[in-house]
Amino acid sequence: MKKSILAICFITSLLTTSCQNKSEDKEIEIQETIDNSEYTDWHSYSNPKETNPEHLSLDIAVDFDKQQISGVAKWKINPEKGVDKVILDTRNMQIDSVLYADGNRANYALGEADEILGAALHVSLLPETKEINVYYKTLEDATALQWLEPSQTFGKKAPFLYTQSESIHVRTWIPSPDSPGARFTYDATVKVPEGLLALMSAENPQEKNENGVYTFQMNEKIPGYLVALAVGDIEFSAVDERTGVYAEPAILEMSAKELDGIGKMVNTAESLYGKYRWGRYDVLMLPSGFPIGGMENPRLTFATPTILAGDKSLTNLIAHELAHSWSGNLVTNATWNDFWLNEGFTTYFEHRIMEAERGEDYAAMLWNLSERTLRGAVEDMGADSPSSQLYVDLKNQDPDLGFTDIPYEKGSAFLMLIEQTVGRKKWDNFLINYFDEHAFQSMTTDYFLDYLDKNLLSENEEWKKTIHIDTWVFGTGIPENYPHLENPLFQAVDKQMEAFIQGGKAADLKTDSWGAQEWMHFVGDLPTNLSIEKMEDLDAVFDLTNSKNSEIADLWYLLALRTNYEVAYPAMKEFLYVTGREKFLDPLYTEMMKTENGKKMAKEIYEIARPNYHPLTQKAMDKIVIE
């Protein structure tokens, strides 16, 4: 998944108190139990190591009028001997009743609600209990759900719903063991209004049916944050026998054309790190309010329409989400402290896919853009900040605070350094074995480092001395042995930029061979004290204010704010009204809030734009613009 930052303070308490069973009016004692035998997930109350949740059967209805999901979550469990209760995570959820498989009511209680973790649902188990059925309804502030009015979609005719469950938001729409270390299979029956299509991270239909009831099956074990649902006026376009694109009819043709290479991309990924194990790989293009670049839901990537540049220049984002089919979905971080194991590997793999498809020079540009992003992030947070470590201690904090550039860019650079040190052939063989041996399992940082040492680095002690593993994983800032790649394409852009800054004209810039990445480098590196005349010159020649490439446009609007280039402001406002991707919103609103005039503009824009943003994005932007 591409970055999303949510600024919330800290967890107040992991303890709960006893409360009454709503159905039987009886109290049960609540005692939190944590299994420390392997690792502790501080962001889940659940006890999957004791109860072994094996399968989830969902039977739910989607009500757009009430903006509510209701139904039953049936959990098949296999409790260890002597375990007398199952604990599930919930947050802002109404629990109506809990039944055993035979229909008898189960004794249950909800713990005290925590601002971040929510409330633990404790269900008493009988010695023979192998299934519990939790009847529930979602509430208005379920953070995983974005309900869109027809006016907020591309087609303007039908409502739309999608979920975004990472990191700990599945508990707002499914009572579940909401820990990345707990894996289970699932099936679902979903009732939606007639005329709409439902999709999940599972085996999916490719066309609407008449009754609005859809069934789904996911036969591979996944963690809860990868359970996903989307409902809307959606149609399908096949790319090849195992890949395709879903989108609203208004953007389906455009989306299918932009992504007609995903079948080849899956083949490329398989040639690097082994068989794709999820059956189909499809992409759902979501409405513009989607808060992140993409979400790697198994079998069905959720993607932002901001990648629809018309020239396939931003499809490396799809390479990133596809790469998660190995790193993240196949082998998953056991806790959110280990998030770099998902995103560092995936960013590295993304660059390798794009190198195989578009060549070394293209990949070098991606690596250089990653380095610039990382250096900017470390500068903002401080080189001594614990947040700049790969392994972060997020106990007593919201795990979404770990969704910074660090796990992506520093993590991938660490893996690049290993590759450069041991050689690509050895490194690739190691990764193939790593994915094969740990498929459909969870991974901690300590375990990975031990596996890395035993299966690769112990072969040569000099490798470990060269890499400095502890400095990279547990140290702050950017290590001195950062594996910088020389990039002749960006070096040529730098010469053009310097000539322009020193008095050259925009018309003299040699840009015919530039792609999106060169333009991102150029616009992103222009000085913030550039004169209005220079801005006008660039805009007159290249029309950057009206760029159709969202990455370039965002960088240009940021520069316009810093240089007071007001000509770009109307286009920037329109951009912010329809674009919900936090990567773009955060820097623009932050920059506007630095001046009094900017604050006024930010508040005016935000009042109009806010309803289009995802609930988590609203919370993050509220802290910038309102609080």
Image: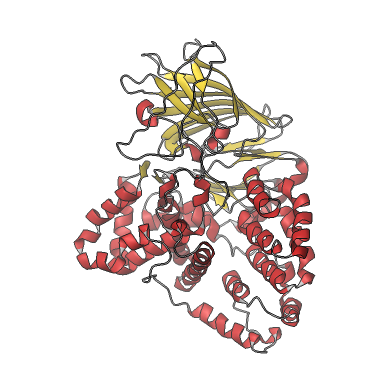
Q: In this rendering, is residue 589 above or below 327?
A: below
Q: Residue at x 53, y 21 (%)?
A: 134
Q: Residue at x 74, y 81 (%)?
A: 537
Q: Residue at x 42, y 67 (%)?
A: 478
- Count of numbered circles on the image: 0
Tell me if residue 22 can be seen: yes
Q: Position of residue 129 (x, y in %)?
A: 40, 16
Q: How is the image coloured?
A: secondary structure
Q: Residue at x 39, y 30 (%)?
A: 48
Q: Position of residue 485 (x, y in %)?
A: 43, 74
608, 14: nearer the viewer: 14
161, 213: nearer the viewer: 161
- The image quarter containing residue 551 is bottom right
- The image quarter containing residue 425 is bottom left
- In the orientation shown, which residue stands out farthest toward the bottom? 503
Q: Position of residue 385 (x, y in %)?
A: 46, 60
On the rendered structure, is 293 left or right of 606?
left
On the rendered structure, is 332 left or right of 109?
left
Q: In this rendering, is residue 596 above or below 79?
A: below
Q: Position of residue 296 (x, y in %)?
A: 51, 47
399, 579: nearer the viewer: 399
Q: In this rendering, is residue 493 above or below 615?
A: below
Tell me if residue 350 can be seen: no
